[in-house]
Image: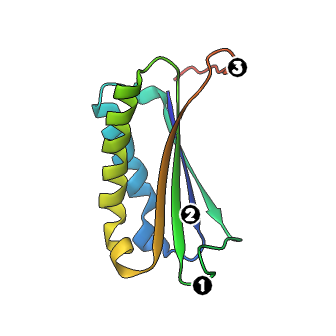
Amino acid sequence: MAHFIYEYSANLPAEQLDLAGLMQTMHRVAADTGVFPLAGIRSRAVRCEEFRVGDGNPDNGFVNLSVKVGHGRDLDTRTAVGEQLFDTLMQHLQPLFDSRPLAVSFEMRELDPHVKFNRKNI
């Protein structure tokens, strides 16, 4: 299980952000690690209309990726996969990063198996 939640500032041009392409790439990279089954990978994006970055310059933008993963992978594995995913995220965002003020952040959280419930038929 890996759930990718992208939050991004509304001032980023959709054609440059290319969320559909980013999600497709991130799913492939995550599945190719062998750590996450493809059927358990989900992505969603939240466009933030109200935001402030740094000094409030309206050109400042942000992309934050939070990844929630199921319990059971050791820290070394999560770190290696996290670095690979962050590198992939930055490769995708590099043209946008080079063209405007942009803050990019990434975090991976392991879910507690005692309080995580799900059901699927995929």
Which secondary structure lies at badge 1?
loop
Q: In the rendered image, which residue does mark 1 sit on?
A: 58
Which secondary structure lies at badge 2?
strand
Q: Residue at x 70, y 19 (%)?
A: 115
Residue 70, above or below 65? above
Q: In the rendered image, which residue does mark 2 sit on?
A: 8
Counting from the top left corner in percent of width and height, residue 47 is at 62, 63
Depth check, mark 1 against mark 2: the one in front is 1
Q: In the rendered image, which residue does mark 3 sit on?
A: 115
Residue 29: name its quadrant. Answer: top left
Q: Is residue 32 left or right of residue 16?
A: left
Answer yes or no: do the residues labelled 3 and 1 have beta carbons within 8 Å? Answer: no
Q: State which tag comes first along the sequence, 3 or 2.
A: 2
Q: Residue at x 63, y 81 (%)?
A: 56
The amino acid beneath tag 3 is Val
Q: CA distance from mark 3 to mark 2?
A: 28 Å
